Every structure is written in C-alpha cells, then in structure tokens.
Image (tube, helix red, strand yellow):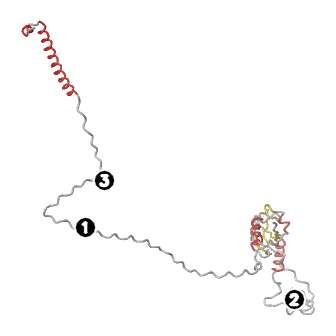
Amino acid sequence: MSPLAASFDPHAKARTTVAATASVAVHVASVLFVLSRFQLAAHIPPPPPPVVRAVAAAPDELDTVPATPEANSPPPAPEVLKPAEPEPKPVERTRRKLDKPEPPPEPPPGPPPPPALCEGCALTSDLTAADVEPAPPGSEPGRATVPLGVPGGKRGGVLGGVSGGVVGGTIGGELGAPRPPASPAKRQVRRARSRLIRPLKEVMAQARWAPNPPEEELKWTRTGLGSQRPGVSRTAFCINKRGRTEAVRTVTAFPGDPGVDAICRQTVQRWRFKPFRVGGRRMRVCTTVSFRIRFVD
C-alpha cells in the first residue's frame, strides 16, 4: 500500500484520538498529584522546636577564651613558684612522772589492846563487878595500900590501921565495932548490876533472830585460807529497851586473826530480841557469847 493510501486509513483517526486522550489524562493526573501534595503539606503542623537544657558546668569545664593581647602591652612576667612549706610535725607531749617517795613500811601489828572500860558495856568474867566498884567511903585519895602487909593485917587494909580492924573502917575508930552499912548509892549500883547482867541462856531465850556467823565469810579470813586453826572469840553485848543489840565489843580475841572477831561482832549487831521486862517495865540487859570457830574442809 502506498503512503497516500495510508493517510486515508479509517482507523488512523481513532488511534490519534485515543493517544491524545491518554496524554491529557496523564497530564491531568500529574497536576492533581502535585496539587494534592501541596495541600497535604499545608495541613501538616510544623515540628516542635528542640528542647534545650541548660546544665551548669564545673569551673574547670568552662571554655575560657583567652583575651587577645594588645600589641603594645608588655609580655606577662613569668610566675615564680614558691616552694611548698613542709607540714609541721605534731609535737608529742610527754608527761613527766613525778617520783613519788615510797611510803614507809607499815609497822608490824602489835598485840591487841585490852578492852577499854566504858559506861554501859557488858560485864564479863574478865571484868567483874569488883573491878569497877567505887573506893570505900573511909579511904582517902593519896593513901597507898600496904604492899607486903603486916602480921595480923587483912587484905585491903591501909597504912595506919590496927590489927583486928575491919576493912573499910575509920582510922581511930572503936575496935570491934560493927562494919558500917553500905551507902544507898553503893546498894543501888550493886542492885543495878545484878539486873544488868543476865546469863546467856536467859538472854537467848528472848531472841527473835540470832543466826551464827556466816561460814562463807569465815572461809575467806586469814585463818580460813591458811592454817584453819580452831579458836574461840568471845563477844560482849547489851540489848536495849527496843530489843536491839548495842555496845558490842570483843573481850577475848580469836588467836592471830582479827578478821574473825570482826565477823563475830557484825553477826551480833544483827541479832534482834524481845525487850526484857522487870515488873512490867522494859530494861536494858547485857551478856557475853562465845563463838567456837572450827574450820572443816
């Protein structure tokens, strides 16, 4: 077929129309796509601004910008480093000990002193009533008794007396006269002593609480830790009107150990009694107790 004949082809016009329509559709779609992109971009909100946190930097971490030295300024002088001063050493303070003089050695203990006579103390067999009786009324101070005696004399006589006289008589008195009666004061003293001293058995019958010396304390005494030698400690005491012990003292010490005597005295001081009554009246009595101490293993 010739080219001329082709131009008059009935299908060529249809193909041209389809191609033009497709081209227009493609351009319209491209324009619509571009417009839709712009519309979407207009509706999207802008992103939030970035959060900036301020953190304080350490002085060593700060960026320091050195100042630009002026042209005419002189150069800085070099820094002279001073030598470090040595740390002072602590001074140790020492206390001087004063030389104290040694105490003198204690003197060896002497024998225990004899029991002192005291008013109201218990009277024992070691201290009888005759030892504390007042002087006879006829005796005068300054007169000494006869040390060796004379033939026919009596014990207790005085210088200037006569043979066959009465003890306690008056010098120059009538020979063979009866002995003068005792004074009321002397009779009262003897009567009071007879009421004051009571046997131990009678006193202990009124006891309310009277334990023995504690064995545990006796074991720790000098004798208990050493020889354990037995012995006796005699303690005198009185009981007042309230039934309590008083005037407690040692009259016969335990041999070689005052600690045993102290324990015995402390024991008696804790004793309690019923008050003694004579004629319905309370009275004070005294007696002596003997503690026989034996150490048993």
- Say what amino acid the circle numbered 1 marks: Glu
| Closer to viewer: mark 1 or mark 2 | 1
**Element carrying mark 2:** loop
What crowding class fits label 3: few (fewer than 14 Cα within 10 Å), some (14-19), or many (20 or more)? few
Query: Looking at the rendering, which quadrant does residue 258 occupy?
Result: bottom right
Label 2: which residue? 157
Report the residue that reaches farthest toward the left: 4
- Say what amino acid the circle numbered 2 marks: Gly
Q: In the picture shown, does residue 12 fall above or below 106?
A: above
User: Measuring 52% from the left and 78% from the top, which residue is drawn there?
Assistant: 96
Image coordinates for residue 273, horizontal then vertical, percent? 79, 63
Label 1: which residue? 79
C-alpha separation, residue under disc 1 versus residue under disc 2: 123 Å
C-alpha separation, residue under disc 3 versus residue under disc 2: 122 Å
What crowding class fits label 1: few (fewer than 14 Cα within 10 Å), some (14-19), or many (20 or more)? few
Of pointers 3 and 2, the one earlier in the residue sequence = 3
Label 3: which residue? 58
Q: Are marks 3 and 2 in contact (CB under 8 Å)?
A: no
Q: In the picture shown, does residue 117 fall above or below 263?
A: below
